[in-house]
Image: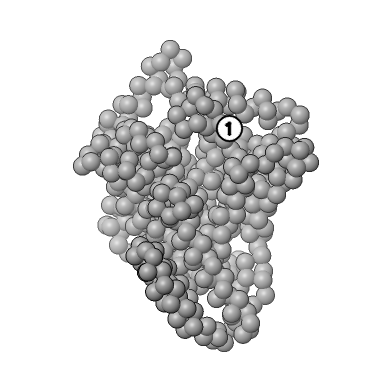
C-alpha cells in the first residue's frame, strides 16, 4: 500500500469537526440518552484516532476478538460491533489521509504483490460471481451481496492496520494487544467448555450465534467469537506470536510461557479435531520458520496438561467414533450436506469455472437456523468464485508465506515476530481449508489480515554473503 512520507502538518480541520460533533450530540440527547452517549463515544474515538492513528489499530486488534461474536443488529443496527468500529476507524483514517494528501503529506501509492493478491481475492469473490450470475439471468439476493462484501471487509482491516502503524514500537504494541485479547478469549473458552461459573449462560445471552442459545451450552469453547473453530484459529495464530516474542524479544519469558499454556488449553477446549490438526501444523511451522525445533519439545507437556484439564471435552468428542459408521455424526452430516446441497450444483453446467454465487449457504427449512453452510473451504472457493478465486487464493498463500518468511528471517524488530505469525497462520489456514472456509472465519480472519499488515512495516536487513 502507500508509503506515508512527508513532514507537513495537516490542515487543522479537527477542531471544527469536533464542534460540529458536539452540536450533533447535544441535539441527539433531546431524543435519546443512549444515542447521545454513543455519539459522544464515537466523536471521542474519531478525535483520538485522528491525533494518534495507531490507536485505531490497537482498538481494532483488541476489541474485535471480544465483540465479533455478538450477532449483527443485536447491539448496533445492521452491523456487528466490530464492523461499526472498523467503519469508524477506517473512515477517520481515510478523511485524515485526504487532508494530508491536499497538503502534500502523502507519498506515491505503491502496491506489493501480496496486496495485489488480496485485491484479487476480493474481486474474484464478489465481482466475478455476480457478473456470472447476471450473465446467466440468476437472481442476486441480499445474501449474495452481503457475502460479496466479506473479503472487502478483511481488506479494510488490512488497510486500517497498514496505514496507521508506522514504526517498530507500534508493531510491538499491536502484537501484545492481540496476545492479551486472545488470552481473554482463551480463558472464556476454557471455562465455557467445562461449564463453570455460569459462563455458558452468559454467552448464550450475548454471544448466541444467530440466536441459537443451545450452541453455547455444548462442551466446546466458542467463547466471544461464537464459533469454536474460529476461536481455536485465533488462539493458534497468537501462539505463533508468543513463540516469536519468546525468541526475538528475550523478555517476559515467564509471562509468555504462561500465556502459551493458556492459548494451547483454549485451542483444545474448542473440541474440534480440525483445530487439533491446526495446532500440530502450527507447531511444526513455528519450528521451521524460526529454526528452533527445540520448541517442539515444549508441546508435549502442554498437550498433556490440556488433555488432563479438558478431559470432559475430549471424552465427549471421542464418543462420536463409537457410532455405526465409525465417524462422528458431525463428519457424516458434513459430507452428506456437501453431496446433497452443493456438489451437484457446483459440478453441473460448468459452474465450477466461475462459481455459483457469493452466498455460502442455502436455505433448508428442516435446519434449526434455516440454512446449510458450506463446510469445505476449497468447495467454498469454487462455489464463490470458481477457478479465478481458487487461483487467487493459491497466489495469496504463496505471496504471504514468502513475505512472512522474509520478515521472520531478515526483518528488524517486532515485524520479524509478525512474519513468524503470518507464515504459521497462512499455512494453518491453507491446511484447514480442507474442512471449512477458515479464510473468512470471523475474528481469526481479522487477526490474520492484521498480521499481514504488520509485516508490511518490516525493514529488511541486508544479507552479507
The x, y position of residue 146, in whole percent, is 58, 47
- The colour style of the image is one colour
Image vertical order of residue 440 relative to residue 435, above or below: below
Q: Is residue 13 left or right of residue 35?
A: right
- The residue drawn where x is 57% and y is 49% is 150
The x, y position of residue 156, in whole percent, is 56, 59
Q: Quadrant of residue 298?
A: top left
The x, y position of residue 356, in whole percent, is 68, 36
Q: Quadrant of residue 116?
A: bottom right
Image vertical order of residue 239 relative to residue 309, above or below: below
Which of the pair 128/257 is nearer the observer? 128
The quadrant of the rendering that contains the C terminus is: bottom right
The quadrant of the rendering that contains the N terminus is: bottom right
Image vertical order of residue 270 relative to residue 34, above or below: above
SS at badge 1:
strand
Q: Quadrant of residue 327?
A: top left
Q: Is residue 297 left or right of residue 373?
A: left
Which of the pair 67/4 is nearer the observer? 67
Do we see residue 399 in this rendering?
A: no
The x, y position of residue 296, in whole percent, is 39, 44
User: Residue tagged by mark 1?
Assistant: 362
- The residue drawn where x is 75% and y is 42% is 134
- The residue drawn where x is 53% and y is 71% is 93
Amino acid at each position: 500500500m502507500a508509503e506515508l512520507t512527508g513532514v507537513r502538518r495537516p490542515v487543522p480541520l479537527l477542531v471544527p469537526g469536533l464542534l460540529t460533533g458536539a452540536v450533533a450530540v447535544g441535539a441527539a440527547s433531546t431524543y435519546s440518552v443512549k444515542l447521545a452517549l454513543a455519539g459522544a463515544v464515537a466523536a471521542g474515538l474519531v478525535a483520538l484516532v485522528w491525533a494518534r492513528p495507531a490507536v485505531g489499530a490497537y482498538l481494532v486488534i483488541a476489541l474485535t476478538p471480544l465483540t465479533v461474536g455478538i450477532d449483527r443488529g443485536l447491539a448496533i443496527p445492521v452491523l456487528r460491533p466490530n464492523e461499526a468500529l472498523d467503519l469508524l476507524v477506517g473512515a477517520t483514517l481515510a478523511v485524515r489521509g485526504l487532508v494530508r494528501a491536499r497538503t502534500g503529506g502523502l507519498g506515491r501509492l505503491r502496491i506489493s504483490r501480496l496486496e495485489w493478491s488480496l485485491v484479487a481475492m476480493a474481486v474474484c469473490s464478489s465481482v466475478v460471481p455476480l457478473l456470472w450470475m447476471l450473465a446467466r439471468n440468476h437472481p442476486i439476493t441480499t445474501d449474495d451481496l452481503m457475502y460479496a462484501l466479506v473479503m472487502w471487509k478483511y481488506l479494510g482491516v488490512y488497510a486500517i492496520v497498514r496505514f496507521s502503524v508506522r514504526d517498530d514500537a507500534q508493531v510491538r504494541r499491536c502484537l501484545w494487544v492481540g496476545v492479551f485479547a486472545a488470552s481473554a478469549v482463551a480463558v472464556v473458552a476454557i471455562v465455557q467448555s467445562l461449564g463453570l461459573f455460569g459462563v455458558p449462560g452468559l454467552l448464550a445471552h450475548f454471544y448466541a450465534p444467530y440466536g441459537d442459545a443451545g450452541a453455547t451450552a455444548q462442551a466446546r469453547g466458542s467463547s466471544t467469537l461464537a464459533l469454536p473453530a474460529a476461536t481455536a484459529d485465533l488462539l493458534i495464530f497468537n501462539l505463533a506470536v508468543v513463540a516469536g516474542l519468546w525468541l526475538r524479544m528475550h523478555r517476559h519469558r515467564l509471562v509468555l510461557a504462561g500465556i502459551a499454556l493458556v492459548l494451547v488449553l483454549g485451542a483444545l477446549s474448542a473440541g474440534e479435531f480440525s483445530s487439533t490438526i491446526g495446532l500440530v501444523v502450527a507447531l511444526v511451522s513455528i519450528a521451521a520458520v524460526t529454526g528452533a525445533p527445540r520448541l517442539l519439545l515444549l508441546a508435549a507437556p502442554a498437550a498433556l496438561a490440556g488433555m488432563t484439564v479438558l478431559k470432559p471435552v475430549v471424552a465427549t468428542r471421542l464418543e462420536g467414533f463409537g457410532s455405526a459408521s465409525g465417524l462422528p455424526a458431525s463428519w457424516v452430516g458434513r459430507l452428506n450436506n456437501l453431496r446433497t446441497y452443493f456438489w451437484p450444483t457446483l459440478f453441473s453446467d460448468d459452474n465450477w469455472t466461475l462459481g455459483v454465487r457469493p452466498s455460502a449457504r442455502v436455505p433448508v427449512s428442516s435446519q434449526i437456523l434455516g440454512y446449510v453452510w458450506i463446510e469445505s473451504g476449497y468447495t467454498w472457493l469454487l462455489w464463490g468464485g470458481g477457478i479465478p478465486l481458487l487461483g487467487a487464493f493459491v497466489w495469496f498463500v504463496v505471496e504471504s508465506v514468502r513475505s512472512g518468511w522474509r520478515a521472520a528471517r531478515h526483518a528488524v524488530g517486532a515485524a520479524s515476530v509478525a512474519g513468524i505469525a503470518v507464515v504459521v497462520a497462512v499455512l494453518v489456514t491453507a491446511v484447514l481449508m480442507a474442512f471449512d472456509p477458515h479464510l473468512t472465519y470471523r475474528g481469526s480472519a481479522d487477526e490474520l489480515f492484521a498480521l499481514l499488515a504488520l509485516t508490511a512495516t518490516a525493514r529488511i536487513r541486508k544479507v552479507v554473503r
